[in-house]
């Protein structure tokens, strides 16, 4: 019986300490622009996708496979395109500690003149 309790206790501890090795992002384009060359990065690992139409959204997972054990944050870079206008835009946001993501979900909402970031723990 003691062995069963030890295994159960160890299982609970391991499950509670595991934060995973990725972070979720929901990118929402609420602007009038076509967004191209979108890059989300944690400094080492990146996700790139070609385009996001106006009023379109995508959910992505950024893996933490190449990251050493240090603190850092995230960045998003992209181009806003409309008619003959191209505007380069970026924003640094969020935080991770010791190379481990927080397990949160970042919602990145791109408006015509700003980038809004919200974080939730679902």
Image (cartoon, grey):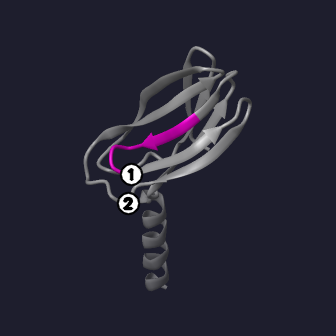
Is residue 24 something one can see in this rendering? no
Magenta-span inclusion, residue 103: no
Snapshot quadrant of residue 85: top right
Does any portion of residue 31 appear in the rendered image? yes
Tell me where residue 12 appears, x and y as whole percent. 49, 66
State the SS at label 2: loop
Left or right? Give the position of 14 relative to 69.
Answer: right
Marks 1 and 2, how far apart in space? 7 Å
Residue annotated with mark 1: 45
Residue at image location 61% in from the left, 37% down from the top = 27
At 61% across and 20% down in the image, what residue appears? 84
Looking at the rendered structure, the secondary structure element under dot 1 is: loop
Q: In this orientation, which residue lies closer to the viewer: 73 or 110?
A: 110
Q: Which residue is mark 2?
A: 65
View extreme (top): residue = 113
Q: Residue at x 66, y 33 (%)?
A: 28
Front label number (1 vs 2): 1
Relative to 7, is 31 on the left or the right? right
Pointer 1 with pointer 2, Cβ within 8 A: yes
Residue drawn at the location 37% of the way across and 60% of the way down:
65
User: Per the image, is 40 magenta?
Assistant: yes
**Labels 1 and 2: the sequence-earlier one:** 1
Q: Is 29 rendered above or below residue 97? A: above
Work out whether residue 67 or residue 30 is closer to the camera in this orientation and state it: 30
Q: Residue furthest front?
A: 84
Q: Which residues are magenta?
A: 36-45
Q: Locate the C terminus and report the quarter of the image it occupies.
A: top right
Q: Position of residue 80 (x, y in %)?
A: 57, 26
Main SS of residues in magenta: strand
């Amino acid at each position: 019986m003691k062995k069963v309790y030890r295994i159960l206790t160890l299982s609970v501890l391991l499950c509670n300490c595991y934060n995973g090795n990725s972070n979720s992002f929901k990118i929402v384009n609420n602007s009038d622009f076509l967004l191209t060359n979108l890059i989300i990065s944690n400094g080492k690992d990146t996700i790139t996708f070609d385009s996001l139409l106006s009023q379109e959204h995508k959910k992505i997972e950024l893996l933490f496979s190449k990251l050493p054990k240090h603190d850092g944050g995230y960045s998003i870079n992209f181009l806003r395109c409309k008619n003959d206008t191209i505007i380069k835009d970026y924003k640094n946001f969020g935080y991770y500690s010791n190379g481990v993501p927080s397990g949160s979900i970042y919602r990145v909402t791109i408006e015509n003149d700003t980038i809004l970031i919200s974080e939730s723990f679902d």
